[in-house]
C-alpha cells in the first residue's frame, strides 16, 4: 500500500469504536502526534483535545472517533475492523470519519515545521449516538475557558462524486410532527355509520403536497409513517396517525406547517430535533477553495445535503466554520470504503489548507 503512515490509519480502523466506545482511538492518535491531550470525558464518552504549536492564531480540526455498528458481518468483503491492505480500503469508519482524522493528523505532521500559530484537534466518541456526552457537553466548558479558534474545519464526509466537489457551511434543522386525524370507529360493512378515513387521509395528503410546494427553497417535509388505531379488516379505525419530518432553515416554516395541520382538526405532537446552523466562512472558504483547486483542479460548491453534524455546536468557540471530508457515498454502508487516491487527495488538501492559513512565510 502506498499511503504514508499507513500504520496509523490501520491502528485507528482496527479500534472497534462503535458509538460511544472510543475503543482506544484517542490513545492511538496521542501516540501518533506524540502529545498528551486534555480530556473532557463525560459519562461513557471520551472527548479529547490535542494541540500543537504556539501563538495566538488557532486552527481547529473537529471530528469523531466513534462509528455506527457494522451490521451483519457476513455481508462484508472483509472484517469491518480488520483493515486489510486492499485498494479501496474496506473498513467501518474509513469514510465517517477516521480517514479524515488520519488525513488531518498526517497533513499536520508533514507541514507542522512550516506553520506559525497553533493547530488543535478536538475529537469526541459520541457523534453517531445521541451525542449528549459529546460536543454538546464539551463546547460550553471550552467557552468558559475563553477558548476561541479563528477557523474550524469539521472532517465529515461532504464530497459527492469526486474529492473536492462539495463542502458544507450550513445544515438544515430537523423537526418532527405526529399528526392524528380522529374520527369514529365503525363496521366496514356500514361505512355510512362511521367516518370516512379514506376522505380524511386523502384530503390531508393533498394539503401536504400543497404545503411542500409552498415551502421556501431547500425546505422539505417528508412523510415517514402512517398508522391506524386498528388493523382488523372489518373495522374502520378510530384514528389515523401520520409521522412527518421537516428539514428547515426558517423557523417560520414550522408555523406554516402547524397552520395547515390545524385546518384538518388534527391532534398535533411536536418533537424538535437539531437546530439549523449557518456559518459564513470567508477566509476559511477562500483558503479551502485554493487548496482544493491546487490539488484537484476543482472548484468546490456549497452543499446543504445530509443530516445534522457537530458543526452546529461550534459557533461559541470558532469564528469561521466549514465542513470538508471524503465522499459520503459509502458512509454507514456495508463495505464502507475509500480509495488510496481519495485519501491522498484529502491529506494533500488539508496540508495546503494549513499552509494557506498558517504559513510562516
Ligand atoms: Zn460522521
Image (cartoon, rainbow, N blue to C red):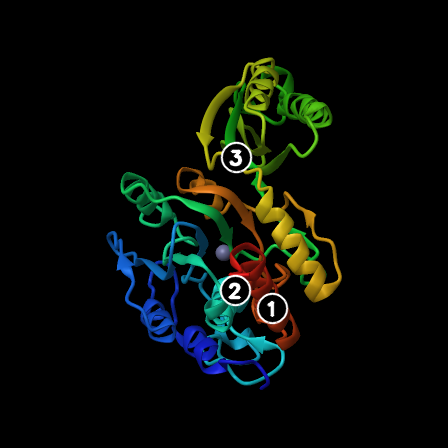
x, y percent for residue 20: 35, 58
- Residue 318 visible in rendering: yes
x, y percent for residue 48: 32, 58
Quarter of the picture containing the C terminus is bottom right
Work out whether mark 2 precedes mark 3 in sequence or the reverse, and give the earlier one: 2
Which circle, 2 or 1, is nearer the viewer? 1
Work out whether mark 2 precedes mark 1 in sequence or the reverse, and give the earlier one: 2
Q: Does 15 appear above or below 21?
A: below
* Quarter assignment of residue 250: top right
Q: Residue at the spot x=52%, y=64% of the render?
A: 100
Q: Which residue is mark 3?
A: 276
Q: Residue at the spot x=55%, y=65% of the render?
A: 95
Give the CA distance from mark 2 to mark 1: 11 Å
Q: Seen in the image, is 106 located left or right of residue 168? A: left
x, y percent for residue 248: 58, 32
Answer whether labels 2 and 3 touch (C-beta < 8 Å): no
- Residue 162 visible in rendering: no
Q: Does 270 appear above or below 12?
A: above
Q: Which mark is residue 100?
A: 2
Q: Could you classify mark 1 by the number of other residues whose Cα lies within 10 Å: few (under 14), some (14-19), or many (20 or more)? A: many
Q: Seen in the image, is 361 located left or right of residue 149? A: right
Q: Does 162 appear above or below 9?
A: above
Quarter of the picture containing the N terminus is bottom right
Amino acid at each position: 500500500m502506498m499511503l504514508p503512515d499507513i500504520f496509523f490509519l490501520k491502528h485507528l480502523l482496527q479500534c472497534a469504536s462503535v458509538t460511544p466506545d472510543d475503543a482506544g482511538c484517542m490513545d492511538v492518535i496521542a501516540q501518533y502526534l506524540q502529545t498528551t491531550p486534555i480530556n473532557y470525558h463525560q459519562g461513557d464518552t471520551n472527548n479529547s483535545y490535542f494541540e500543537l504549536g504556539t501563538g495566538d492564531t488557532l486552527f481547529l480540526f473537529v471530528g469523531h472517533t466513534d462509528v455506527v455498528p457494522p451490521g451483519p458481518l457476513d455481508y462484508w468483503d472483509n472484517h469491518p475492523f480488520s483493515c486489510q491492505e486492499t485498494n479501496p480500503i474496506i473498513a467501518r469508519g474509513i469514510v465517517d470519519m477516521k480517514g479524515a482524522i488520519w488525513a488531518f493528523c498526517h497533513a499536520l505532521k508533514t507541514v507542522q515545521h512550516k506553520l506559525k500559530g497553533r493547530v488543535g484537534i478536538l475529537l469526541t466518541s459520541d457523534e453517531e449516538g445521541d451525542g449528549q456526552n459529546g460536543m454538546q457537553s464539551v463546547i460550553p466548558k471550552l467557552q468558559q475557558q475563553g477558548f476561541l479558534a479563528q477557523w474550524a474545519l469539521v472532517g465529515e464526509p461532504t464530497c459527492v462524486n469526486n474529492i473536492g466537489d462539495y463542502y458544507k457551511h450550513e445544515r438544515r434543522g430537523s423537526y418532527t410532527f405526529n399528526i392524528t386525524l380522529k374520527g369514529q370507529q365503525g363496521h366496514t360493512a356500514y361505512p355510512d355509520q362511521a367516518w370516512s378515513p379514506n376522505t380524511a387521509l386523502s384530503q390531508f395528503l393533498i394539503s401536504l403536497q400543497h404545503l411542500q410546494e409552498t415551502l421556501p427553497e431547500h425546505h422539505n417535509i417528508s412523510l415517514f409513517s402512517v398508522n391506524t388505531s386498528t388493523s382488523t379488516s372489518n373495522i374502520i379505525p378510530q384514528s389515523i396517525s401520520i409521522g412527518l419530518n421537516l428539514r428547515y432553515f426558517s423557523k417560520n416554516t414550522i408555523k406554516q406547517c402547524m397552520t395547515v395541520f390545524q385546518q384538518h382538526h388534527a391532534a398535533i405532537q411536536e418533537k424538535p430535533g437539531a437546530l439549523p446552523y449557518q456559518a459564513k466562512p470567508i477566509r476559511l472558504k477562500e483558503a479551502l477553495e485554493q487548496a482544493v483547486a491546487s490539488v484537484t483542479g476543482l472548484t468546490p460548491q456549497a452543499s446543504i445535503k445530509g443530516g445534522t453534524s457537530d458543526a452546529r455546536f461550534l459557533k461559541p468557540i470558532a469564528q469561521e466554520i466549514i465542513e470538508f471530508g471524503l465522499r459520503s457515498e459509502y458512509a454507514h454502508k456495508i463495505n464502507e470504503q475509500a480509495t488510496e487516491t481519495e485519501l491522498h487527495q484529502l491529506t494533500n488538501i488539508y496540508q495546503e489548507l494549513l499552509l494557506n492559513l498558517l504559513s510562516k512565510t
